């Protein structure tokens, strides 16, 4: 069992189910509304834990009902929340997620306490980061905090894994401290200017990250699978073909399951390929269910799937 530290967001997902997405100016009738624990950080922590890793969560919630429910959920998943702080001055992060009848989604995030995590709180968490094999971060928290955390990790031989979502301008300094970056097609386009349509264009996008110092690039392609790129080798690893019900947690399920297979401090291409295949299985299972965290599969389910 490897140890993973997740520094990231904790959100309450407010999920709206509709037959089809509205256009600008249109009013439609929805089918249902529900509140489900989420946030990319928390989702990836749950995915890694269910995939068999020992997981430590670092983040911040409010002192409201949503915050209490999020902490309660992480505890039920046996995720360490020693370094999830509370802030009474801001609300807990919230995501408004609209899911259509084909499983597609639009997401709007209100960051709340996620953007209030401080350097002093990170410093206190250093002892947890340094005892883990992997530090996993996203872009739903402050980028300068992520950079400080990655520097902390690299000083101690910890693998740094970056999911640049939602996409925003990333500094070259942060990429220098990133071992593995996992954008999807949209994020790769926003970060590199390259529209990934095949292996050639995936290689062009990957080169952007390699030139900045990243060691490995994985570009997730939804139903097409994922491209795994190292400096000397690259290939597309196909997805498992299923009928999607809700794709909300597909990426987070992939990343958490993938991270659960990493063993540091050295990275091996063949080991990463096996981890991508494992992640593809987790994502395929997740999209066949509704909700974010409720859809994330267990280790037993992933292991037994698609043999």
Image (cartoon, helix red, strand yellow):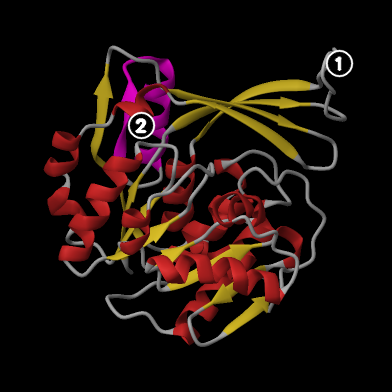
Whether residue 180 appears in this view of the structure is: yes
Q: Is residue 90 above or below residue 4?
A: above
Percent from the top left, x then y, of residue 260? Answer: 42, 65
Q: Residues within 10 Å of mark 2 (few under 14, many from 20)?
A: many
The answer to whether the residue labelled 2 contacts the one labelled 1, judged by CB atoms less than 8 Å apart, is no
Q: Nearer the viewer, residue 243 or 229?
A: 229
Which residue is at 86% across, 15% downward?
26
Q: Quick one: SS at disc 2?
A: helix
Q: Is residue 135 above or below residue 294?
A: below
Residue picked out by circle 2: 71
Q: Which stretch did the figure color magenta?
A: 58-76
**In this image, 190 relative to 179: left or right?**
right
Q: Is residue 215 above or below residue 139?
A: below
Which residue is at 67% across, 76% downward?
236
Percent from the top left, x then y, of residue 263? Answer: 34, 75
Q: Quadrant of the N terminus?
A: bottom left
Instruction: Decide which of tag 2 and tag 1 comes sooner along the chain.
Output: 1
Label annotation for residue 28:
1
**In this image, 87 relative to 246: left or right?**
left
Give the image quarter of residue 4.
bottom left
**In this image, 142 relative to 252: left or right?**
left
Q: Nearer the viewer, residue 58 or 112?
A: 112
Q: Quick one: SS at disc 1?
A: loop
Q: Nearer the viewer, residue 43 or 137?
A: 137
Give the image quarter of residue 98.
top right
Q: CA distance from mark 2 to mark 1?
A: 34 Å
Whether residue 279 appears in this view of the structure is: no
Label annotation for residue 206:
none
Give the image quarter of residue 192.
bottom right
Question: Principal SS element in the magenta part?
Answer: helix
- Magenta segment includes 73: yes
- Magenta segment includes 304: no
């Amino acid at each position: 069992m490897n140890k993973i530290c997740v520094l990231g967001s904790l959100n309450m997902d407010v999920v709206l189910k509709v037959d089809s997405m509205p256009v600008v100016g249109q009013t439609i009738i929805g089918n249902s509304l529900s509140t489900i624990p989420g946030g990319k950080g928390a989702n990836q922590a749950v995915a890694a834990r269910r995939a068999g890793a020992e997981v430590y969560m670092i983040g911040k919630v409010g002192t409201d009902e949503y915050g209490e429910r999020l902490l309660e959920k992480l505890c039920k998943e046996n995720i360490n929340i020693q370094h999830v702080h509370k802030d009474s001055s801001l609300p807990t992060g919230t995501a408004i997620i609209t899911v259509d009848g084909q499983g597609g989604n639009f997401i709007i995030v209100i960051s709340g306490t996620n953007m209030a995590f401080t350097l002093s709180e990170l410093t206190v968490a250093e002892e947890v980061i340094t005892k883990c094999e992997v530090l996993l971060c996203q872009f739903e928290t402050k980028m300068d905090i992520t950079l400080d955390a990655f520097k902390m990790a690299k000083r101690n031989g910890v693998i740094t894994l970056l999911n640049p979502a939602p996409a925003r301008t990333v500094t070259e300094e942060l990429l220098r401290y990133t071992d593995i970056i996992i954008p999807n097609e949209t994020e790769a386009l926003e970060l590199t200017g390259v529209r990934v349509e095949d292996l050639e264009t995936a290689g062009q996008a990957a080169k952007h990250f390699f030139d900045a110092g990243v060691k490995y690039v994985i570009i997730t392609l939804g139903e097409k699978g994922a491209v795994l790129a190292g400096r000397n080798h690259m290939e597309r690893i196909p997805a498992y073909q299923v009928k999607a019900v809700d794709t909300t947690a597909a990426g987070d399920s992939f990343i958490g399951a993938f991270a659960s297979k990493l063993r540091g401090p050295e990275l091996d291409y063949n080991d990463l390929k096996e981890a991508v295949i494992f992640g593809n299985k987790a994502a395929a299972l997740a999209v066949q269910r509704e909700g974010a965290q409720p859809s994330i599969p267990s280790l037993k389910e992933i292991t037994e799937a698609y043999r």
